[in-house]
Image (cartoon, rainbow, N blue to C red):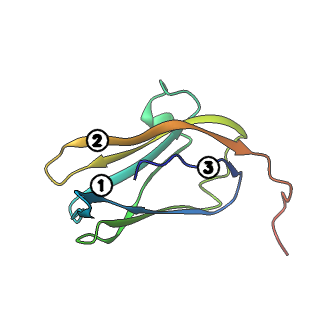
Amino acid sequence: MASRLNNFYRRDTKAYNMTFTSGGLPLDISLATITFTMKRRASDLDASAAIQKKAVITNGPGGLATLTLTSTDTEVDIGKYYYDIQYKSGTGTITTLVASTIEILQDVTITGLP
């Protein structure tokens, strides 16, 4: 899980499936917490994040988790954001898996689908 996230359109639903391994074998993440944080400025307080959401552990012993951003989550201003995904182990060790920038693009359909 060290891939960058691709830019996406505002109000789109996005699902990111993550696989955690160690030495090529699944890493048991049953007691872990995986958090996605997206901010306008990297220095903004977490409380001011545009999006902060925890991934759902879908198969702890198999090292599988899914981060789902709903259309409500992604209803943010268009533009450039900073984000990271952090992994907190069951013992409290925190590791930043990826940190980068992402562009939220202007959607064309604004009123929703019929």
Which of labels 3 and 1 is toward the front? 3
- Is the residue under label 1 in contact with that under label 3 (CB below 8 Å)? no
Of the pair 16 and 19, the residue shown nearer to us: 19
Which of labels 2 and 1 is toward the front? 2
Rendered location of residue 12, percent (x, y): 69, 60
| Mark before the other along the chain sequence, 3 or 1 | 3
- Please count the marks in the image: 3
Q: Is residue 36 above or below residue 43?
A: below
Identified by mark 1, the residue type is: Thr
Q: Which mark is residue 95?
A: 2
Q: Which mark is residue 33?
A: 1
Identify the residue position indicated by label 3 in the image: 6
Element assignment for label 3: loop
Answer few, some or many: residues within 10 Å of disc 2's Cα (few below 14, many 20 plus, some between 14 and 19): few
Task: Say which residue appears at 82% left-offset and 71% top-offset.
Answer: 113
Q: CA distance from mark 3 to mark 1?
A: 22 Å
Rendered location of residue 68, percent (x, y): 51, 63
Task: Say which residue appears at 51% left-offset and 35% top-offset.
Answer: 48
Question: Is 80 situated left or right of 85 in this image?
Answer: right
Element assignment for label 2: strand
Task: Say which residue appears at 44% left-offset and 29% top-offset.
Answer: 45
Identified by mark 2, the residue type is: Thr
- As drawn, the residue found furthest toward the left would be 91
Residue 27 sits in quarter: bottom left
| Mark before the other along the chain sequence, 2 or 3 | 3
Identified by mark 3, the residue type is: Asn
**The C terminus appears in which quarter of the rendering?**
bottom right
